[in-house]
Amino acid sequence: MKVGGIFGITALIVLIYLWEWPKLKKNGRKIIVVFFTLITIGWVLAILLVLFPNMPGPSQLIDFIFKPIGRYWEIS
Amino acid sequence: MIEKGKISPFQMALIIYAVVVGTAILYIPFITAQHAKRDLWLSPIWAALSGFLIVFIITKLYKLYPKKTLVEYSELILGRTLGKIIGFIFLFFLLYDTAIAFREYGEFVESAFLHKTPLVVVTGGIALTCAFAVHGGIEVLGRCAIIFLPIVLVLYLIIYLFLIPDLNVKNIFPIMEYGWIPSIKGSLAPHAWLSQFSLLSFLLPFLSDETKGMKWSILSVSVSVMTMVYINLGNIFLFGGIITSTQFPVFQAARYISIGSIFEHVESIVIAVWVLGGFVQLSAFFYMLVLGTSQWLKLHSHKPIILPFGFLIILFSVWSASSFQEMIRSMGTTTPFYFITIQLLIPMLLLFVAVIREKLRKA
């Protein structure tokens, strides 16, 4: 199941790459760097999410920061 | 300038209306009802304060820095490094906000129709469609809004008109049974939603007629608040006390519609039309995110990063909450403060610094 997930994600990333590459080449170096950074972040994050579905994320950070005020809105 | 398209002030008002109201009536009434109970309909009126305040701040900032978006002028106001940091915080928030909106629609469609489909397939499908609209640029968004939004608006209106025989106006009493506090407490989530008018900052530079920007923004806030009040009143008339346990009240209301027992199962039409509004909303979010990022990085074109961002949005929509219950809990407690901090306090801070700068420059 997990291997399938990783395989699927990689396939999707490759598809995005193949789709954008012909247009990317014309757009200069900077955009290529940004594009690859973005898809690498996406790829790593996707695989991490497949392997550890309960990984703490931004929501936990928000919960942590705003807990002191948010407490008063908790439904008892 | 990356984007060359222009939109009319009316189109801008419709886009921002879709951005705010599309999800504000999906399950926000449920969250509001937890605190406000029968005073549910009062909460959006308190929240209107946030809406008007943020429109005032954003238009003021826009007058000081014409033709610039929030990401661009934060750099001019606070200097390069600090401005970039603020820009990043805002963009990260936008990514999170977009992801949440995708998740909401995904959960909604799944719980209403596609019970066995994995969430990612639903959100991924929407993201792919939106990517086409984003690729078309701001003009496509404006035209989508002008075609789809009137249909959606009429839908919001007629759901409760069809239900008039079932509405019980007495459900609204007693008004303010426990004083002001419950309705103000319940207004937290509507406050957060109306503070999304800060995203106007990404639309104002594309107006064809800038003098009318402020007028239409104010109008858009008013209509949003009125829609929320109308929907909440309809809900309280229809459901009464059980409103506190109805997750998607408007959808539940649509299920009740039955006219002469030939006109039934209207909810399927409701969802289809709702997703139209959702399409405009999600594309607008997606567009602002992509545009903001390319301005932040000073790229020449925003088109190549659309698909990678679509992928990231889907990941964040999965990552942002482990379950829908979890999401509703955080939406009722901590997440609104995140919304308000980023969308109200940051523009306020920017305006404060900008005004001081202006004064110093003139002195």
Image (spheres, coloured by chain):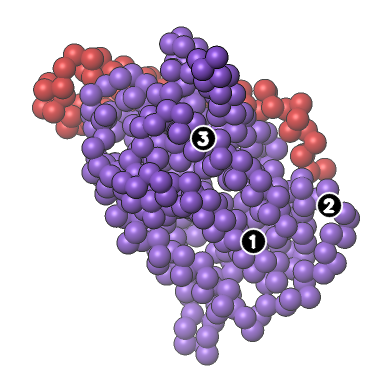
Closer to the eye: label 1 or 3: 3
Q: Distance from label 2 to label 3 (Cα)?
A: 32 Å
Marks 2/3 in contact by CB < 8 Å: the verdict is no
Looking at the rendered structure, the secondary structure element under dot 1 is helix
* Mark 2 or mark 3, earlier in chain: 3
Q: What's under tag 2, amino acid-wise?
A: Trp
**Residue drawn where x is 60% and y is 33% of the image:** B344
**Residue drawn where x is 76% and y is 39% of the image:** A73
Which x, y percent locates residue B277?
Answer: 42, 56
The colour chain B appears in is purple
Mark 2 Cα-neighbour bin, 10 Å: few <14, some 14–19, many ≥20 = some
Q: Chain of mark 2?
A: B
Could you tell me which quadrant the C terminus of chain B lies in? top right
* Mark 2 or mark 1, earlier in chain: 2
Front residue (pair B273, B199): B199
Marks 2/1 in contact by CB < 8 Å: the verdict is no
Looking at the rendered structure, the secondary structure element under dot 3 is helix
Front residue (pair B221, A37): B221
According to the picture, the residue beneath numbered tag 3 turns out to be B60
Answer whether residue A14 is visible to the viewer in this image: no
Q: Chain of mark 3?
A: B
Closer to the eye: label 2 or 3: 3
Q: Is circle 2 on the same chain as circle 3?
A: yes
According to the picture, the residue beneath numbered tag 2 turns out to be B180
Could you tell me which quadrant the N terminus of chain B lies in? top left
Q: Distance from label 1 to label 3 (Cα)?
A: 28 Å
